[in-house]
Image (spheres, rainbow, N blue to C red):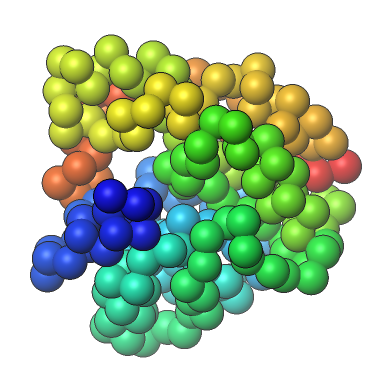
Amino acid sequence: MNQQNFWNQRYADEHYAYGTLPNNYLKEKSADLRPGKIMLPAEGEGRNAIFMAKLGWEVEAFDQSTAGKNKALLLAEHHDVKISYTISDVENIRYPENSFDALALIFAHFPGEDRRIEHRKLSRFLKPGGHLVIEGFSKKQATFQQLNPKSGGPRDVGMLYDLEELKKDFNDFEFIEATEEKVVLAEGEFHQGEASVIRIFAVKK
């Protein structure tokens, strides 16, 4: 099954696979930011996009899944906010360079061989002085998946994050925070329980 079909199938149900509340780390970091224009890759069913729009951000989201987009737009309508949502993978997405004030990669995992290329591409869309927020599963998540399959994350270890690799991917950023942590996730059906994540908060030089 290709990635687009996988995510369309996951988002096909009426319930929201990862809930409708925002990611806790993004919520925490948003308190330190002044609203502007934010890009949310691999945004799925829209929980983070809607949250940021409610804070006054201009939101540009994209994902491969049409099912995810449809549910995101329903959620936006429910909360009476507007978001822009494009159906695309990261390889084909196009935005003007230096056009965003923030980039949030929330559990946005790309194939290992393409990861650095895709991260460099996304970083070019961010203005100098723009902020980067990342939360994603670390390599150690493979162990947590064995203990609890509902803790989440790609089953392909090559798609899981390594902190030093991410620092190299975003080597033109100043890192305010860059940590690997054990957390307890409670995000819908598929992010439940203890997990190992990497969290990054950084500024583009």
Q: Is residue 193 left or right of residue 141?
A: left
In the rendered image, residue 87, in percent from the top left (x then y), is placed at: 47, 72
Q: Residue at x 72, y 32 (%)?
A: 169
Residue 147 appears anywhere in the view: yes
Residue 29 appears anywhere in the view: no
Figure quadrant of the C terminus:
top right
**Considering depth in this image, is 8 or 40 the residue closer to the camera?**
8
Q: Is residue 9 left or right of residue 183?
A: left
In the rendered image, residue 72, in percent from the top left (x then y), is placed at: 34, 73
Q: Is residue 80 left or right of residue 15?
A: right
- Please state the total of marks drawn on the protein image: 0
**Considering depth in this image, is 44 or 83 the residue closer to the camera?**
44
Q: Quadrant of residue 178?
A: top right
Q: Quadrant of residue 15?
A: bottom left
Q: Residue at x 68, y 35 (%)?
A: 116
In the rendered image, residue 155, in percent from the top left (x then y), is placed at: 31, 29
- Above or below 3: residue 138: above
Q: Residue at x 67, y 61 (%)?
A: 34
